[in-house]
Amino acid sequence: MLVRLRKGLAPDQIETVLALCRELGYAPRFLGAERQMLELEGAGRPSHRSLLEDLAGVVEVLATGDARELHQADPRTSATQVRAAEARFGAGAISLIAGPCAVEDEQALLHIARGVRARGATLLRGGAYKPRTSPYSFQGLGRPALEMLARVRAEVGIGVVTEVLDTRDVEAVAEVADMIQIGARSMASSPLLLEVGRTMKPVLLKRGFGATVRELLMAAEFLLSTGNDQVVLCERGVRSFDDCTRNLLDVGAVAFLARETHLPVIVDPSHSAGRSDLVRALARSGMAAGADGLIIEVHPRPEQTHSDGQQAISLCELGRIRRDIEALAALGEARLVIPADHATPTEPALPAGDAP
Ligand code: PEP
Ligand code: MN
Protein backbone atom coordinates (compact mmCIF):
# COMPACT_ATOMS: atom_id res chain seq x y z
CA MET A 1 0.00 0.00 0.00
CA LEU A 2 1.18 3.55 -0.71
CA VAL A 3 0.33 6.57 1.43
CA ARG A 4 0.93 10.11 0.24
CA LEU A 5 1.58 12.60 3.04
CA ARG A 6 1.05 16.35 3.06
CA LYS A 7 4.07 18.47 2.20
CA GLY A 8 5.99 20.05 5.06
CA LEU A 9 4.67 17.95 7.94
CA ALA A 10 6.30 18.52 11.33
CA PRO A 11 8.25 15.52 12.73
CA ASP A 12 5.55 14.81 15.36
CA GLN A 13 2.84 14.77 12.64
CA ILE A 14 4.90 12.28 10.65
CA GLU A 15 5.34 10.24 13.82
CA THR A 16 1.52 10.10 14.27
CA VAL A 17 1.16 8.56 10.79
CA LEU A 18 4.02 6.12 11.34
CA ALA A 19 2.61 5.09 14.73
CA LEU A 20 -0.78 4.22 13.19
CA CYS A 21 0.91 2.28 10.38
CA ARG A 22 2.83 0.20 12.94
CA GLU A 23 -0.26 -0.26 15.07
CA LEU A 24 -2.05 -1.65 11.99
CA GLY A 25 0.78 -4.16 11.56
CA TYR A 26 2.76 -2.55 8.73
CA ALA A 27 6.44 -1.90 8.31
CA PRO A 28 6.43 1.69 6.90
CA ARG A 29 9.26 2.91 4.68
CA PHE A 30 9.68 6.30 2.95
CA LEU A 31 10.24 6.34 -0.80
CA GLY A 32 12.52 9.26 -1.70
CA ALA A 33 14.20 11.93 0.35
CA GLU A 34 11.13 14.27 0.48
CA ARG A 35 9.52 11.89 2.99
CA GLN A 36 6.15 12.30 1.31
CA MET A 37 5.44 8.86 -0.13
CA LEU A 38 5.22 6.06 2.37
CA GLU A 39 5.27 2.39 1.39
CA LEU A 40 3.56 0.00 3.78
CA GLU A 41 4.52 -3.62 3.79
CA GLY A 42 2.31 -6.16 5.44
CA ALA A 43 -1.11 -7.79 5.26
CA GLY A 44 -3.80 -5.19 4.76
CA ARG A 45 -7.37 -5.12 5.99
CA PRO A 46 -10.50 -3.51 4.45
CA SER A 47 -10.69 -0.84 7.16
CA HIS A 48 -7.13 0.43 6.75
CA ARG A 49 -7.66 2.86 3.88
CA SER A 50 -10.31 4.86 5.76
CA LEU A 51 -8.35 4.80 9.04
CA LEU A 52 -5.26 6.21 7.32
CA GLU A 53 -7.20 8.75 5.25
CA ASP A 54 -8.74 10.12 8.44
CA LEU A 55 -5.33 11.40 9.59
CA ALA A 56 -4.77 15.10 8.90
CA GLY A 57 -1.27 14.41 7.57
CA VAL A 58 -2.45 11.99 4.86
CA VAL A 59 -3.43 13.28 1.40
CA GLU A 60 -4.41 9.94 -0.11
CA VAL A 61 -3.97 6.21 0.07
CA LEU A 62 -2.93 4.59 -3.20
CA ALA A 63 -2.45 1.08 -4.51
CA THR A 64 -4.26 -0.50 -1.60
CA GLY A 65 -3.20 -4.01 -2.66
CA ASP A 66 -4.25 -6.47 0.01
CA ALA A 67 -6.04 -3.77 2.00
CA ARG A 68 -8.95 -4.22 -0.37
CA GLU A 69 -12.23 -2.77 0.81
CA LEU A 70 -15.18 -5.14 0.79
CA HIS A 71 -16.76 -3.75 -2.39
CA GLN A 72 -13.58 -3.87 -4.48
CA ALA A 73 -13.19 -6.29 -7.35
CA ASP A 74 -10.52 -8.90 -6.73
CA PRO A 75 -8.96 -10.51 -9.81
CA ARG A 76 -8.65 -13.76 -7.84
CA THR A 77 -12.39 -14.11 -7.20
CA SER A 78 -15.45 -13.90 -9.40
CA ALA A 79 -18.10 -11.20 -9.47
CA THR A 80 -20.89 -11.42 -6.90
CA GLN A 81 -24.25 -12.52 -8.18
CA VAL A 82 -27.22 -11.17 -6.26
CA ARG A 83 -30.30 -13.40 -6.15
CA ALA A 84 -33.75 -12.18 -5.23
CA ALA A 85 -36.76 -14.36 -6.02
CA GLU A 86 -36.30 -15.28 -9.70
CA ALA A 87 -34.03 -12.32 -10.41
CA ARG A 88 -30.26 -12.64 -10.82
CA PHE A 89 -27.94 -9.67 -11.06
CA GLY A 90 -24.27 -9.81 -12.01
CA ALA A 91 -21.79 -12.45 -13.19
CA GLY A 92 -23.40 -12.53 -16.63
CA ALA A 93 -27.01 -12.26 -15.44
CA ILE A 94 -29.23 -9.29 -16.19
CA SER A 95 -32.64 -8.73 -14.60
CA LEU A 96 -35.45 -6.28 -15.07
CA ILE A 97 -37.34 -4.63 -12.20
CA ALA A 98 -40.52 -2.77 -13.09
CA GLY A 99 -43.65 -1.39 -11.48
CA PRO A 100 -45.27 1.77 -10.21
CA CYS A 101 -43.48 4.47 -8.26
CA ALA A 102 -45.84 4.04 -5.32
CA VAL A 103 -48.35 1.38 -4.31
CA GLU A 104 -51.69 3.14 -4.46
CA ASP A 105 -54.41 0.77 -5.63
CA GLU A 106 -54.40 -3.01 -5.31
CA GLN A 107 -56.24 -3.76 -8.57
CA ALA A 108 -53.88 -1.51 -10.52
CA LEU A 109 -50.89 -3.11 -8.79
CA LEU A 110 -52.13 -6.59 -9.68
CA HIS A 111 -52.60 -5.59 -13.31
CA ILE A 112 -49.14 -4.00 -13.48
CA ALA A 113 -47.52 -7.00 -11.77
CA ARG A 114 -48.98 -9.39 -14.35
CA GLY A 115 -48.11 -7.05 -17.20
CA VAL A 116 -44.47 -6.49 -16.22
CA ARG A 117 -43.92 -10.18 -15.51
CA ALA A 118 -45.26 -11.04 -18.95
CA ARG A 119 -42.67 -8.66 -20.36
CA GLY A 120 -39.72 -10.27 -18.65
CA ALA A 121 -39.55 -8.50 -15.28
CA THR A 122 -38.59 -10.81 -12.43
CA LEU A 123 -39.17 -8.23 -9.69
CA LEU A 124 -42.05 -5.84 -9.07
CA ARG A 125 -41.13 -2.41 -7.71
CA GLY A 126 -43.54 -0.24 -5.73
CA GLY A 127 -43.08 2.03 -2.75
CA ALA A 128 -45.15 1.72 0.41
CA TYR A 129 -43.04 4.46 2.01
CA LYS A 130 -42.21 7.32 -0.34
CA PRO A 131 -39.34 9.74 0.27
CA ARG A 132 -40.84 13.02 -0.93
CA THR A 133 -39.26 16.44 -1.13
CA SER A 134 -42.30 18.13 0.42
CA PRO A 135 -43.99 16.92 3.62
CA TYR A 136 -47.32 17.87 2.00
CA SER A 137 -46.90 15.49 -0.95
CA PHE A 138 -48.25 11.92 -0.92
CA GLN A 139 -45.98 9.95 1.43
CA GLY A 140 -47.11 6.43 0.49
CA LEU A 141 -49.76 4.26 2.12
CA GLY A 142 -47.37 2.57 4.56
CA ARG A 143 -48.42 -0.73 6.15
CA PRO A 144 -51.60 -1.23 4.03
CA ALA A 145 -49.38 -0.94 0.93
CA LEU A 146 -47.02 -3.60 2.32
CA GLU A 147 -50.05 -5.87 2.73
CA MET A 148 -51.09 -5.20 -0.88
CA LEU A 149 -47.58 -6.03 -2.07
CA ALA A 150 -47.67 -9.30 -0.12
CA ARG A 151 -51.02 -10.31 -1.66
CA VAL A 152 -49.99 -9.39 -5.21
CA ARG A 153 -46.66 -11.19 -4.76
CA ALA A 154 -48.53 -14.36 -3.73
CA GLU A 155 -51.12 -14.04 -6.50
CA VAL A 156 -48.73 -13.33 -9.39
CA GLY A 157 -45.64 -15.16 -8.17
CA ILE A 158 -43.35 -12.19 -8.72
CA GLY A 159 -40.71 -11.01 -6.23
CA VAL A 160 -41.03 -7.57 -4.67
CA VAL A 161 -38.61 -4.64 -4.25
CA THR A 162 -39.77 -1.91 -1.91
CA GLU A 163 -38.11 0.97 -0.11
CA VAL A 164 -37.58 1.42 3.61
CA LEU A 165 -37.02 4.89 5.02
CA ASP A 166 -37.03 4.32 8.77
CA THR A 167 -35.15 1.78 10.88
CA ARG A 168 -38.41 1.14 12.79
CA ASP A 169 -40.01 -0.27 9.60
CA VAL A 170 -37.16 -2.54 8.55
CA GLU A 171 -38.64 -5.69 10.10
CA ALA A 172 -42.07 -5.18 8.50
CA VAL A 173 -40.56 -4.37 5.09
CA ALA A 174 -38.20 -7.36 5.27
CA GLU A 175 -41.19 -9.66 5.80
CA VAL A 176 -42.68 -8.70 2.43
CA ALA A 177 -39.70 -7.69 0.30
CA ASP A 178 -37.49 -10.02 -1.66
CA MET A 179 -35.13 -7.06 -2.04
CA ILE A 180 -35.06 -3.97 0.18
CA GLN A 181 -34.49 -0.60 -1.49
CA ILE A 182 -32.49 2.16 0.15
CA GLY A 183 -33.34 5.30 -1.76
CA ALA A 184 -31.18 8.18 -2.93
CA ARG A 185 -32.23 10.35 0.01
CA SER A 186 -31.31 7.65 2.55
CA MET A 187 -28.04 6.51 1.01
CA ALA A 188 -25.93 8.18 3.68
CA SER A 189 -27.96 7.01 6.67
CA SER A 190 -25.55 4.60 8.34
CA PRO A 191 -28.01 3.34 11.02
CA LEU A 192 -30.47 2.42 8.25
CA LEU A 193 -27.74 0.77 6.16
CA LEU A 194 -26.63 -1.34 9.12
CA GLU A 195 -30.18 -2.32 10.09
CA VAL A 196 -31.07 -3.30 6.51
CA GLY A 197 -27.75 -5.12 6.01
CA ARG A 198 -28.40 -7.23 9.12
CA THR A 199 -31.65 -8.62 7.67
CA MET A 200 -29.41 -10.55 5.22
CA LYS A 201 -31.97 -9.77 2.52
CA PRO A 202 -30.77 -8.57 -0.89
CA VAL A 203 -30.44 -4.78 -0.92
CA LEU A 204 -30.88 -2.28 -3.73
CA LEU A 205 -28.72 0.72 -2.85
CA LYS A 206 -29.43 3.87 -4.87
CA ARG A 207 -26.83 6.57 -5.31
CA GLY A 208 -27.71 9.89 -3.72
CA PHE A 209 -28.26 12.65 -6.29
CA GLY A 210 -25.45 14.66 -4.71
CA ALA A 211 -23.23 11.76 -3.76
CA THR A 212 -19.87 10.91 -5.26
CA VAL A 213 -19.20 7.39 -6.42
CA ARG A 214 -16.82 7.00 -3.46
CA GLU A 215 -19.66 7.95 -1.08
CA LEU A 216 -21.93 5.38 -2.74
CA LEU A 217 -19.22 2.77 -2.31
CA MET A 218 -18.79 3.64 1.36
CA ALA A 219 -22.56 3.27 1.83
CA ALA A 220 -22.23 -0.17 0.23
CA GLU A 221 -19.34 -0.83 2.61
CA PHE A 222 -21.68 -0.28 5.59
CA LEU A 223 -24.02 -2.93 4.18
CA LEU A 224 -21.18 -5.34 3.37
CA SER A 225 -19.64 -4.87 6.83
CA THR A 226 -22.68 -6.66 8.29
CA GLY A 227 -21.66 -9.80 6.40
CA ASN A 228 -24.43 -9.35 3.81
CA ASP A 229 -22.92 -9.49 0.32
CA GLN A 230 -26.25 -9.34 -1.53
CA VAL A 231 -25.93 -5.72 -2.56
CA VAL A 232 -26.94 -4.21 -5.92
CA LEU A 233 -25.75 -0.67 -6.66
CA CYS A 234 -28.06 1.64 -8.60
CA GLU A 235 -27.19 4.73 -10.64
CA ARG A 236 -30.31 6.91 -10.85
CA GLY A 237 -28.88 10.21 -12.01
CA VAL A 238 -27.20 13.09 -10.21
CA ARG A 239 -27.91 16.82 -9.97
CA SER A 240 -26.44 18.91 -12.73
CA PHE A 241 -26.59 22.51 -13.95
CA ASP A 242 -28.98 21.53 -16.71
CA ASP A 243 -32.66 20.68 -16.42
CA CYS A 244 -33.49 19.00 -19.72
CA THR A 245 -33.66 15.74 -17.75
CA ARG A 246 -34.68 15.40 -14.09
CA ASN A 247 -31.21 14.14 -13.20
CA LEU A 248 -28.05 13.54 -15.18
CA LEU A 249 -27.57 9.81 -15.78
CA ASP A 250 -23.93 9.16 -14.96
CA VAL A 251 -23.06 6.37 -17.38
CA GLY A 252 -19.37 6.90 -16.60
CA ALA A 253 -20.13 5.85 -13.03
CA VAL A 254 -21.85 2.70 -14.32
CA ALA A 255 -18.81 1.75 -16.40
CA PHE A 256 -16.50 2.53 -13.45
CA LEU A 257 -18.54 0.52 -10.95
CA ALA A 258 -18.84 -2.44 -13.32
CA ARG A 259 -15.04 -2.55 -13.51
CA GLU A 260 -13.96 -1.60 -10.00
CA THR A 261 -16.40 -3.51 -7.81
CA HIS A 262 -17.53 -7.12 -7.68
CA LEU A 263 -21.08 -5.97 -6.99
CA PRO A 264 -23.76 -5.77 -9.66
CA VAL A 265 -24.82 -2.31 -10.79
CA ILE A 266 -28.16 -1.41 -12.32
CA VAL A 267 -29.59 1.75 -13.85
CA ASP A 268 -32.80 3.62 -13.08
CA PRO A 269 -33.63 5.47 -16.31
CA SER A 270 -36.97 6.70 -14.88
CA HIS A 271 -35.64 9.01 -12.17
CA SER A 272 -32.82 10.14 -14.47
CA ALA A 273 -35.13 11.02 -17.35
CA GLY A 274 -38.06 12.41 -15.39
CA ARG A 275 -40.19 12.03 -18.52
CA SER A 276 -41.53 8.89 -20.12
CA ASP A 277 -40.38 9.61 -23.68
CA LEU A 278 -36.67 9.56 -22.72
CA VAL A 279 -36.73 6.44 -20.54
CA ARG A 280 -36.02 3.97 -23.34
CA ALA A 281 -32.97 5.84 -24.63
CA LEU A 282 -31.50 6.12 -21.13
CA ALA A 283 -32.22 2.46 -20.48
CA ARG A 284 -30.25 1.58 -23.59
CA SER A 285 -27.33 3.78 -22.62
CA GLY A 286 -27.19 2.26 -19.14
CA MET A 287 -27.10 -1.26 -20.56
CA ALA A 288 -24.46 -0.26 -23.10
CA ALA A 289 -22.30 1.08 -20.26
CA GLY A 290 -22.31 -2.34 -18.62
CA ALA A 291 -25.30 -2.39 -16.28
CA ASP A 292 -26.53 -5.72 -14.88
CA GLY A 293 -30.15 -4.65 -15.02
CA LEU A 294 -32.71 -1.89 -14.94
CA ILE A 295 -35.36 -0.59 -12.56
CA ILE A 296 -38.17 1.16 -14.41
CA GLU A 297 -41.38 2.90 -13.39
CA VAL A 298 -44.40 1.60 -15.28
CA HIS A 299 -48.02 2.66 -15.05
CA PRO A 300 -50.83 2.19 -17.58
CA ARG A 301 -52.70 5.20 -16.20
CA PRO A 302 -50.01 7.66 -15.13
CA GLU A 303 -52.50 10.52 -14.88
CA GLN A 304 -54.12 8.74 -11.92
CA THR A 305 -50.99 8.39 -9.80
CA HIS A 306 -49.83 10.67 -6.99
CA SER A 307 -46.12 10.36 -7.61
CA ASP A 308 -43.88 10.37 -10.68
CA GLY A 309 -46.68 9.87 -13.24
CA GLN A 310 -44.81 11.99 -15.81
CA GLN A 311 -41.98 9.45 -16.03
CA ALA A 312 -44.05 6.24 -15.98
CA ILE A 313 -43.91 4.26 -19.22
CA SER A 314 -46.58 1.97 -20.64
CA LEU A 315 -46.40 -1.82 -20.60
CA CYS A 316 -45.91 -1.68 -24.35
CA GLU A 317 -42.83 0.49 -24.00
CA LEU A 318 -41.50 -1.91 -21.36
CA GLY A 319 -41.83 -4.69 -23.94
CA ARG A 320 -39.66 -2.67 -26.34
CA ILE A 321 -37.06 -2.06 -23.64
CA ARG A 322 -36.99 -5.77 -22.85
CA ARG A 323 -36.10 -6.49 -26.48
CA ASP A 324 -33.41 -3.77 -26.36
CA ILE A 325 -31.92 -5.38 -23.25
CA GLU A 326 -31.80 -8.77 -24.91
CA ALA A 327 -29.97 -7.33 -27.92
CA LEU A 328 -27.50 -5.35 -25.77
CA ALA A 329 -26.98 -8.23 -23.34
CA ALA A 330 -25.76 -10.40 -26.20
CA LEU A 331 -23.03 -7.83 -26.94
CA GLY A 332 -21.72 -8.12 -23.40
CA GLU A 333 -22.00 -11.92 -23.33
CA ALA A 334 -24.68 -11.69 -20.67
CA ARG A 335 -28.30 -12.86 -20.66
CA LEU A 336 -31.60 -11.49 -19.46
CA VAL A 337 -33.07 -13.73 -16.76
CA ILE A 338 -36.80 -13.96 -17.33
CA PRO A 339 -39.61 -15.54 -15.31
CA ALA A 340 -39.49 -19.33 -15.60
CA ASP A 341 -42.91 -19.66 -17.19
CA HIS A 342 -42.34 -16.86 -19.72
CA ALA A 343 -39.63 -18.39 -21.82
CA THR A 344 -41.71 -17.40 -24.82
CA PRO A 345 -42.93 -13.86 -24.33
CA THR A 346 -46.65 -13.47 -24.24
CA GLU A 347 -48.16 -10.04 -24.65
CA PRO A 348 -51.47 -9.83 -22.77
CA ALA A 349 -54.13 -7.69 -24.40
CA LEU A 350 -53.58 -4.05 -23.60
CA PRO A 351 -56.12 -2.51 -21.29
CA ALA A 352 -57.76 0.71 -22.42
CA GLY A 353 -55.51 3.61 -21.54
CA ASP A 354 -52.24 1.74 -21.97
CA ALA A 355 -51.24 3.72 -25.00
CA PRO A 356 -48.18 2.38 -26.81
C1 PEP B 1 -38.08 5.62 -6.27
O1 PEP B 1 -37.46 4.63 -6.62
O2 PEP B 1 -39.31 5.78 -6.43
C2 PEP B 1 -37.32 6.75 -5.69
C3 PEP B 1 -37.87 7.60 -4.86
O3 PEP B 1 -36.07 6.79 -6.15
P1 PEP B 1 -34.82 7.69 -5.69
O4 PEP B 1 -34.54 7.29 -4.25
O5 PEP B 1 -33.75 7.28 -6.64
O6 PEP B 1 -35.23 9.13 -5.83
MN1 MN C 1 -40.49 7.39 -8.23
Image (cartoon, rainbow, N blue to C red):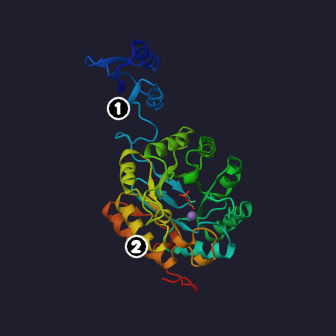
Q: Position of residue 99 (x, y in %)?
A: 56, 68
Task: Mark 1: give few (<14), some (14-19) or many (20+) Cα within 10 Å.
Answer: some
Q: Which mark is residue 252?
A: none
Q: Are marks 2 and 1 in contact (CB under 8 Å)?
A: no
Q: Residue at x 49, y 41 (%)?
A: 218
Q: Quickly name the residue at label 1.
A: 62
Task: Mark 2: give few (<14), some (14-19) or many (20+) Cα within 10 Å.
Answer: some
Q: Which mark is residue 323?
A: 2
Q: CA distance from mark 2 to mark 1?
A: 42 Å
Q: Depth check: 220 or 123 in front? A: 220
Dot 1 falls on a residue whose secondary structure is: strand
Q: Position of residue 89 (x, y in %)?
A: 46, 56
Q: Residue furthest right?
A: 144
Q: Is residue 208 above or below residue 283?
A: above
Q: Position of residue 13 (x, y in %)?
A: 43, 17
What's under tag 1, amino acid-wise? Leu
